[in-house]
Structure formats: C-alpha cells, structure tokens
Image: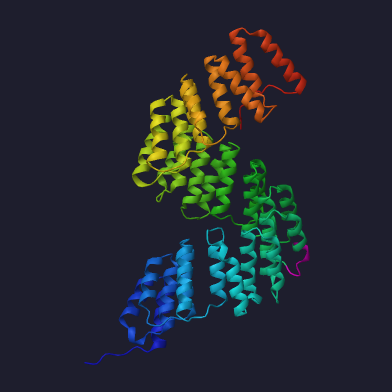
Amino acid sequence: MCTVTITTPQLNYMINTYIDNNNVKQAHKLLDENLLSCNIVSWNMVMTAYLQHNQIGPVHDLFDKMPLKDAVSWNIMLSGFQRTRNSEGLYRCFLQMGRAGVVPNDYTISTLLRAVISTELDVLVRQVHALAFHLGHYLNVFVGSSLIRAYAGLKEEEALGRAFNDISMKDVTSWNALVSSYMELGKFVDAQTAFDQMPQRNIISWTTLVNGYVKNKQVNKARSVFDDMSERNVVSWTAMISGYVQNKRFVDALKLFVLMFKTETRPNHFTFSSVLDACAGSSSLIMGLQLHPCIIKSGIANDVIWLTSLVDMYAKCGDMDAAFGVFESIRDKNLVSWNAIIGGYASHGLATRALEEFDRMKVVGTPDEVTFVNVLSACVHAGLVEEGEKHFTDMLTKYGIQAEMEHYSCMVDLYGRAGRFDEAENLIKNMPFEPDVVLWGALLAACGLHSNLELGEYAAERIRRLESSHPVSYSVLSKIQGEKGVWSSVNELRDTMKERGIKKQTAISWVE
C-alpha cells in the first residue's frame, strides 16, 4: 500500500483553505502530518493565523520547531511580543534575529519602534533610527512614520520633524503621523499648519485632527473641524461624541448622536458606549432606556464594553435593579464591570450590596485602586469604620496597591463622620503627600457634623491656602461657629465673603 505525498503547493493551498474557514487547529494538524512537504511559507501561514487569533503560545511553539526561518518568521514572533506588551522579550528576540544572520526589513524596524514607545526601552529609539539609516530603511514611509511617532513618545519635536523630512516619498500616512504627533505634544498650531499643508487628506486625516483637539481640550475647535468634514464615517462621529463626553459636555454628545442617527450612519459598540456614558453623566435615564433596545436591535453582539457602560448608566441614573440585571448578563465580566456595579451600590448608600459584590469579585479576579475607592466609599456611607480599616490595610499589604489621595480622603471621611478625629489627624500627618482640597473638605464636613470648632478652623484655613475663594471653607466654618455661639467670628466670615465676592454654595437637584 502506497501513500500519496502532498506537494508543497498543494499543502499550502490546503492550509490556507483551513485558515480561511477559521479552522487554525486543523491547519496546524495538517502541517504536523506533512512536515516533509513544508516550506517556510507553510510555517509562517499557520503562525500568522494563530497570531491573528491572539494565541501567542502556539506561535512560540511553532517558531521554536521551525528548521529554517526567514525575516517574515522573525517578524511574526516580534509581533507576538508586541501584542503581549512584552518589550523585553521582543528586544531579546530582535538580538537573536541579528545573531542568526537575518537582516531586518522595514516591518521589523517599525514593529520594534512601536513596541518600545512609552516603555523603559524607549532609549533604543535613536539606536533603531541609526540602524534604519544604515540599512537604508529610513527613507521608507512605513519606517519613517513609526520614527515620527516614536520621537513624539520621547517628546522630541525637532527629531520627529527631521524623521518626517527624511521620508523621500511622503504619503498621507506620513502626514497623518506628523499631525498626530504634534497633537500628542500639545503643539496644535503646528498640527493645524501641517494639516493645512497636506497635499492630500483622507477621513483619517480629519479624524486625527479632531482627536488631537479633543485631547488638548479644544473641544469647540474639534467640532469646527468636524463640521468642515466633507464625509464622515462611524469613527469620526464616535471621536467627536467621545470628545464631548471626555470634556463632560454630555448634552452636546447626546445631541450629536441624534444627528448621527439621522444621517443613517450605523453606530458601533464604541459609539453606543460613549453615548451611554453621556446618559450616565447627565442622569438621562429616559434617553438611556430608549438607547438600550436600540443597541439590541442594531444586532451588535453582547460586548463587555457597551454592557459595562449600560451598567454604569443605569447605576448613575438610580436604577440599580436594572444595573444589576445587565451586570449579571455579562458573560465575561472584567475589572471595569465589577467596579461599575460595586461603585453603583456604594454611591447609592447600599453598602451591604456593594461589599457582597466585592466578595464575589475577589473569587474571580483581583481588585485595583478604583475598586478600593468604591469599597471604602461604601464603608463611609454605612459608617463601617472597622470594615473600612480592614479593607484599607488589605489594599496596602495583601494586594500591594499604593494608597492615593482618594483612598485617604475616604478614610478621613470615615473617621470624621464617626467622630474619631484623632485617627483622622494621624492619618493625615502620615500621608506620603500633601492633602488636597477634597481631603480637607471631608475633614471640615465632619467637623461641621460634630461641631468641632478648633479642628474645623484648621481645616478651613488649609482649604483657603489651596483655594482662597473656595466657598466651603467659609460656609461650613460659619455654621460651626454659629452652633458654638461665636457670632463675632460668623460676622467676620460673612464680611470677608462679601469683600471677596464669594457666594455660598446652593443645593441642587437633577430633574429630567
């Protein structure tokens, strides 16, 4: 009985067919069963397929087994390290590539540059630039654009300008990289100038400019650029909506979404997530309720991003039953999802439920600094001092999370509301940084609750040192002095407020 040998072209065709049908494991099996017919292309195809499915382990295994490797093989491996944000592994792999005598190509150089940006290995950017120059890749648009972004990451304006000038045949991609980099450095005048000089623009060019103005908090200018666009896609619409949300202009975000809907541009899950954040920020439950079935009808698959935004929206709009119902429907809950539900219960004073969800979370994941802000806030609302102390200690010792200002503010608030001012003062004295207005405000509010005039005067003075016109330092202190019958001091404070034009804060409520 004879066996039929598959030729290399036949094998590669069959492997490619399996990959096109999203059956990577079968392609891998076919490779293993026909090793004698394999060539470098066969190995690279299967490795690339695994990489596209973010399965880095099999990529490593196949790479180690390859009898021969070319530049493409090494580039696939480098891309795997980049995707896993393993910049040190990528650097070692790059050194091994050189020792193996394989010459890096433009994709190698670009991948290496992208991987080291904003890492401890960003010192390599100049060396990689020199290598690209030596290999003749520095004139390449692909490498040149990566160099521009790398120097932007180093905040070296002149160097990124030189990298742009070194590109012999500049295309729209290289111009977009220049505009984006100037925006990243906060040089929006230079970015606008570069944009105006572009010989050719595409939607990415316009969206890059919009995003740049948003990041520099020039949201009105971003909207002006957005309005000038001759054509828009879902990315540009979402960029502008998200820009409004980031700048807390929630009503403007909702109005723009309605306008987008009228243009029949189909929103994606990022768009819906931003709009849900706008609903949450403006406490617009009615809009959120209309949006929920709209998302379902759009056919977008259940995605942890927009489902978490939905949880946050319902929680901030006060409907915790709906928030919990959506939360339970999330199949693969992530840290943001857990923080949304715990924070929702905490903000509504439902400490028991917040702590119950926190206990559930610890079984499946590890909390972060945001989680502990929510947990400590829940303890504050319920007056659970010992519970709060335990979680604060666990955060520092068990989870190794460094306490930030918000955590200290919660603990000061917790001690202060319980009238335990000695513990609050000791905590403040031992903080590794200077207290801010929020922390002193928490202490002052507690002094007002317990009519502690001496400590209240001290807290109010500290607030005024940071913000001389902050109304809380006057109004709360005036209340304490009135309760103590120190009317001369009350009158002095009121006269000072009049002289400085400081108005007492008025209570507000939101009615949709």
Check if residue 196 falls in the magenta segment: yes
Q: Is residue 348 visible?
A: no
Name the quadrant containing residue 280. top right
Q: Is residue 1 left or right of residue 302?
A: left
Which corner quadrant holds the N terminus?
bottom left
253, above or below 20, in the image = above
**For the point 65% across and 73% down, which residue is it?**
141
User: Would you place residue 227 above or below residue 349 in this image?
Assistant: below
Range drawn in magenta: 195-200
Report the residue that reaches farthest toward the left.
Answer: 1
Query: Which residue sits at x=34%, y=88%?
Result: 6
Instruction: Please identify the quarter of the rendering in which residue 288 is found.
Output: top right
From this view, report whether residue 229 is shown above or below residue 317: below
Quarter of the image containing the C terminus?
Answer: top right
In this rendering, is residue 273 above or below 496?
below
**Number of marks drawn:** 0
- Residue 255 or residue 315, whichever sits in front: 315
Question: At which x and y percent is residue 224?
Answer: 75, 52
Name the residue located 58 percent from the left edge and 70 percent from the top edge: 128
Q: Is residue 430 or residue 440 the one in the foreground?
A: 430
Q: Is residue 462 magenta?
A: no
Task: Give the image's coloring scheme.
Answer: rainbow
Q: Residue at x 41, y 43 (%)?
A: 400
Q: Which one is nearer the viewer's eye here, 247 or 508?
A: 247
- x, y percentage for residue 38? 38, 84
Residue 268 seen from this side: yes
